Image (cartoon, coloured by chain):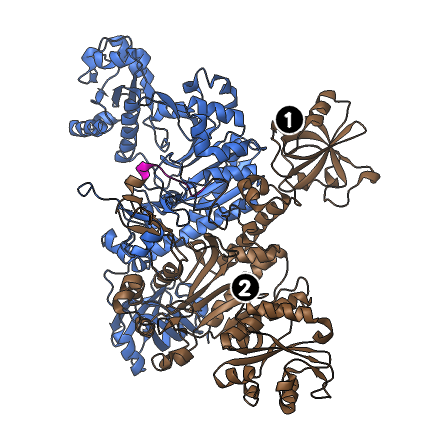
Chain colours: A brown, B blue
Amino acid sequence: MLPRTYCGDFTVMHIGQTVRLNGWTQTNRDHGGVVFLDVRDRSGLVQVVVHPDTPEMHKLAHAMRQQDVIEVVGEVIARSEATVNGNIPTGEIEVKATDIVVLNGSETPPFMVDDDCDTSEQVRLEYRYLDLRRPKMQRFMELRHRVTHAARNYLDSQKFLEIETPILNKSTPEGARDYLVPSRVYPGSFYALPQSPQIFKQLLMVAGMDRYYQIARCFRDEDLRADRQPEFTQVDIELSFVDQDEVMAVAEGLLRSMFDAGVGIRLPEEFPRITYNEAMERFGLDRPDIRFGLEHVNVTELMKKVEFKVFREPADNGGLIKVMRVPDGAAQLSRKQIDDYTKFVSIYGARGLAWIKVNDKSDLPGGLQSPIVKFLPEDVLAELLEASGAENGDLLFFGAGDTQVVNDALGHLRVKMGHDLNLIAENDHRFVWVVDFPMFAWNADEKRPEALHHPFTAPREDELHKLETDPLNICSQAYDLVWNGTEIGGGSIRIHKPEVQARVFKTLCISDEEADEKFGFLVKALKYGAPPHGGLAFGLDRVLALMAGVDSIRDVIAFPKTQKAADPMSDAPSEVADAQWKELGLRKRPTIKES
Amino acid sequence: MLPRTYCGDFTVMHIGQTVRLNGWTQTNRDHGGVVFLDVRDRSGLVQVVVHPDTPEMHKLAHAMRQQDVIEVVGEVIARSEATVNGNIPTGEIEVKATDIVVLNGSETPPFMVDDDCDTSEQVRLEYRYLDLRRPKMQRFMELRHRVTHAARNYLDSQKFLEIETPILNKSTPEGARDYLVPSRVYPGSFYALPQSPQIFKQLLMVAGMDRYYQIARCFRDEDLRADRQPEFTQVDIELSFVDQDEVMAVAEGLLRSMFDAGVGIRLPEEFPRITYNEAMERFGLDRPDIRFGLEHVNVTELMKKVEFKVFREPADNGGLIKVMRVPDGAAQLSRKQIDDYTKFVSIYGARGLAWIKVNDKSDLPGGLQSPIVKFLPEDVLAELLEASGAENGDLLFFGAGDTQVVNDALGHLRVKMGHDLNLIAENDHRFVWVVDFPMFAWNADEKRPEALHHPFTAPREDELHKLETDPLNICSQAYDLVWNGTEIGGGSIRIHKPEVQARVFKTLCISDEEADEKFGFLVKALKYGAPPHGGLAFGLDRVLALMAGVDSIRDVIAFPKTQKAADPMSDAPSEVADAQWKELGLRKRPTIKES
């Protein structure tokens, strides 16, 4: 049998050759008695021509339906100049069929198997095998393969070992909600699916594996917000005998190789870094999008001078007042748009959105147009213009109030306006590390510090002495990587000394019993020669969605679940047989009405 | 800071250099006041010397405990000729320490972290992080990494796409028992963990992905016999537009690359093939170990001539009589040993083990020593010697009775004797494909044919016409790969035409409703242009155990479970909080006493 040539691989070099190809009939056109079939496989599309001088085959070709699977033998010929198609790579040739076999027919598909199909996602998921046959989805799956393969090659070159950690784990009621798996051998007991391989990868470092990686499936039984999946994939690494800089260098190399393989762009040799505090100050968010300006300026101190209650009260009471300068915003933004932005920031809890249009900064206060100018003395206005760097024609937005609310509101407003005002260049990819996160946040409900990352994150060595006396002002050795304003990964140096781990548990008000119950085996392991270690994980689905330029991670996952964690194709989850309930020693809990 | 050199990487080329190394203190010896530390990391071991002229460091080194984690800075020096250690790669040098830091201490480990530790497996699993720190286990993990990485590279070079299929699936009460995952969103419904990605990989072929691979985690909730694990890993591939030969060629290439990377041995370009029938005839098992002889000879026809009931009855009633010649067995095997083998075959249901010692084949019947010779006429004895190829000094073993029992008994006896008689050369790796399996086996209980592989396996094209009339005499397009008598993988060409799938379901007495309920989405997918396709899966854990030369797959899995599917380290499975039960709408089934 002739070897198969992939449809997309045909070039003018094949002219004159007898070839075999396989694929799906995409279109079927009759031009003056000659039938033209577009035949597609994963690699691309080729045109097959069938002349009326082969009447049986011609009849077959005529009757061919979309998505019929065929085998074609024929001769590659050059297209006439008039029919050359510059839009497809195989556009200079066609295959003159000498034999066509229909390997399998297709019923009429529920939607066009084509890139510009606009079927609902529910139907796409129900017929995922047809949805994935669309060229775009096939390219996404190829992208996923290329990127993960590049990641593996890079990590292999850096002496990482791929090690599989278990999926059937112990449930630890920490973090998100676990998916549970009832045990048949121990009725009433459960395994839990891992939210991440965190503890196991630390144990591998204790085991002296030195460098571990895994492209690991993780699970979270959460109510699915926007773009989450019950199971997702993480590029997970851990290294021994390293500091933060070394982990970050490896992560940068890893991402460079993934990015290069995925979209063919060389990333810079070193990514910029910003501290958590600076990110909050300048951008209001701990995942700053640094592709554009609109940076914030803190004017809290200045506002301690004013009578205007909206600004003065938060300034006096540990709150925050920030100004965000929009260059040329005075003319660009209508009153209506400003009202819309005011509504927008209210989502984040802001009570209003004060603004000043700078018409002529040499004329104070007359050159400023704003409902609040009358409340601010001239010297404050002058200082404000100075601090914000305002120029004539600019617009200033203000946030004032609770620190968190102001940062949230102005941070998100900044991002929205960056898009609205077209301040973001196309194909601009900016990575930035956020470092020096606080070790703890104050949990006001439970009146205790809680870990901002996880309780195994190491505090900075130089601040360790403040662990008991001033925990809220300690930074951890955690780092997040942000790509165009989206957090795509993060990690930390871990605690490797059992006594430090015990101190951190104490600060978190976790009792010895609780620590033992939840993390006993890790704490125990630290006592047997745990090396200094740290690591990081990337959200692979998110990285791929960003590379592919799609909004939803579902488009880069072969078989995703719906927002309700169901699979419309297989109908999972589903009822199971009584025998299965019995074997697991389970029964349904009566609903409230019945009980 | 000096870059780190791995302990095992030191050579004479480093002599004179100042270096930094990290690792675990393995031993600590004092020779005439000089302290010698053996320091190990994943790469190997290096000797560190500490002289008394650095008193503080000397004191520290003296006090060093096993498994303390240290950092050493020092100078690489040549060992004196008398102290060169030819047993380790770094045996020509040592590191004269100028600085030592204890990064973390270790309590006394519960067992020696060394290759020849003979602790119970239960303790090894409880302290798996220490067990894995043993050089042997680290080498197994490196082997696993190397082999899987080679597999991925090979499959990438063959245009396979790595595609992840879901872990949260629909339960299909077919095959082994599913692990179930209760759904919180749909109380009373369950996901199931996949026993294999079978249906999904077929759907990927329908989706036009052309070539799929995955190193896939699979799950079976079985009572763990000998060497099974609740979760295991499979190298899983599927291809479109191929026949059996093409799948097998890819599988051979894949295995060659894995074998080369794993143990550095080149496998033959093509593996031999044997039909299922021939394997059963010659070896009694469908996973023949072809490293040695002791082949079986079928003498059923011959025995139709004799009166001797033990042979005549099965011969007349569709049973089987086989002889297995043991060259030089007459002298080698004592009566006691023959009795032991008789006991052995009784495990497989054989009622006895007839034998003949061939002392002088020119003298019939006097030259034959056996309890049964008197029952067999001289011409039959002559034909028997001829058929079995017996020579003087040989021993003949007989199996007679039910075909399955005879094959089982003599098949396993053959393997046992191959080992007992040292007929197997060391480091001999023999692969063989078993092909032409029967499509169906007769299920006597349910009085219906059942699929020998799975119901998606394609029958041979040339026998398809007998599907309704003579199903038990149809071969499938399934193939198993056997390595030294162990089945390590298998697969088949799948059914791609919906009408053939319907006919197979009918033959299996699976109703339309049942088929729809269980496999509806696959059957539906076949209607929309499913290409011809087939594939295969290797059991990765088994392959690695064979490569590593260990009996248990647990030795090549980082964190395996016990025979009772538990993890002594983390204590999984475990009880969960009441809130978790409630959220899932579950409660414990009362035990029989209570109900």
| Secondary structure under the numbered disc 1 in the rendered image | strand
Residue B132 sits in quarter: bottom left
Identify residue type, mark 1. Answer: Val
Q: Which mark is residue A253?
A: 2
The residue lying furthest to the bottom in this view is A379
Residue B101 sits in quarter: bottom left
Q: Residues within 10 Å of mark 2 (few under 14, many from 20)?
A: many
Q: Measured along the vertical axis of the image, is residue A65 above or below residue B141?
A: above
Q: Nearer the viewer, residue B104 or A340?
A: A340
In-image side of A221 versus A182 (left or right): right
Q: Are marks 1 and 2 on the same chain?
A: yes
Foreground label between 1 and 2: 1
Q: Which residue is mark 1?
A: A101
Q: Which residues are magenta?
A: A572-580
Residue A574 magenta-highlighted: yes
Residue A342 magenta-highlighted: no
